Image (cartoon, rainbow, N blue to C red):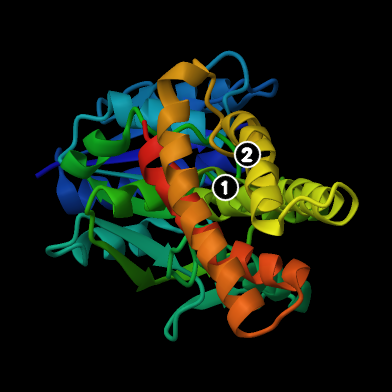
Amino acid sequence: MKLSIVIPAYNEEKRILPTLEDYYTFFKEKLKDSFEIIIIPNNCDDKTLEVVDSFSNDKKEISIFEIKGYSGKGGAVLKGFELAKGDFIGFSDADGSTNAEQFSLLYDNLFSSEGIIGSRRMKNSQVVPKRSLMDRCNSFIFNFLEKIFVGLNFKDTQCGAKIFNKSLIKTFLNKSKEKGWIFDLDLLYLSKMNGGRIKEFPISWTDKEGTKLKFKDKVRSFFEVIKYGLNGPRKSWKQFFTFSVIGVISTLIHLGLLYFLTDFIKIYYLLSSVFGFVVANIFSFIANSRFTFEKKIDPRKRYHKFLIISLISLGINLSALYLFTEIFGLYYLLSQIVATLFSLWVNFLGNKFWTFRR
């Protein structure tokens, strides 16, 4: 069994050499020839490439692939995954925050899992020096957001030490689109979606000087997690919110016409409601096609489905309107609001899983 270790590097001339010396020496002794180190300098404008070239000159276990043009950590790691020849493929930060011995512990504890990630927040984890209150607050917020918006239940997704089975990597290699700070999050979510069993393991982690992650980057990462969740794992939440907003506007159109036709034109309120429903329904179809389900479609191909769902919803709507107005004696406008709440979920689920289904 062979282990591939990918080390992405962006302007790491001052920190990468001790890391390479540590990893090469440790794994050469432990695994002999059953390992490789793949270094990915990423658009560096310092002497990183010269440093790694010099170190790897006579070492067949080390290969280098330079990326010209910034691709982010994610792009660099994915390129390393493509080049890797090992049965197990991992990556670690160029600054040596996770030393070779700790990385080896991850490898030794894979067992029957398809992947393992280092964690700085488990019971037996050690962080040197102790993280500041601000850093711990940032981590807490990030973890909370990823649980809510992505559905992952790890204590630390951002530690830069992870190893995956090659067969699992193949399932998500061409699906991962994230290149920035939430790249790790994307890998873990895709692993989960492909049935991968990912283990979290406590490690000792050293906070190195010269970090490139600034406070504004940490704040931006919060919004990136939310954006990622709403465009993927929690897209249904975003869709339901948009659907509901359009529903509110449609309801106002419906109520406005109902009130105008009933109180001013003196049309029977049920007929007024039908007319208001039809106008609001057409508006809803156009708006949901464009904004909720983001479909550029020929209305003739899907409107009949939308209309069927709408008619079912209308039946529920009118039945509830009649029930609350005639039986319970509620004012008809209030009854209409209650009726709309009953029909909203039928409308959303029917259109999501039938009308606008891919």
Q: Amino acid at mark 2?
A: Val
- Relative height, residue 231 to residue 83 (above, below): below
Give the quarter of the figure containing the C terminus. Answer: top left
Residue named by callout 2: 278
Q: Which residue lies at the image location 69% right of the left edge and 24% below the top edge?
A: 46
Q: Nearer the viewer, residue 50 or 252?
A: 252
Spot occupied by residue 92 in the image (x, y as percentages of width and height): 44, 48
Q: Which residue lies at the image location 76% right of the left edge and 47% below the top edge?
A: 249
Residue at the right extreme of this rendering: 264
Q: Amino acid at mark 1?
A: Gln
**Is residue 138 in view from this perspective?**
yes
SS assignment at label 2: helix
- 256 on left or right of 79: right
Q: Nearer the viewer, residue 192 or 86?
A: 192
Spot occupied by residue 52 in the image (x, y as percentages of width and height): 49, 27
Residue named by callout 1: 239
Give the quarter of the figure containing the N terminus. Answer: top left
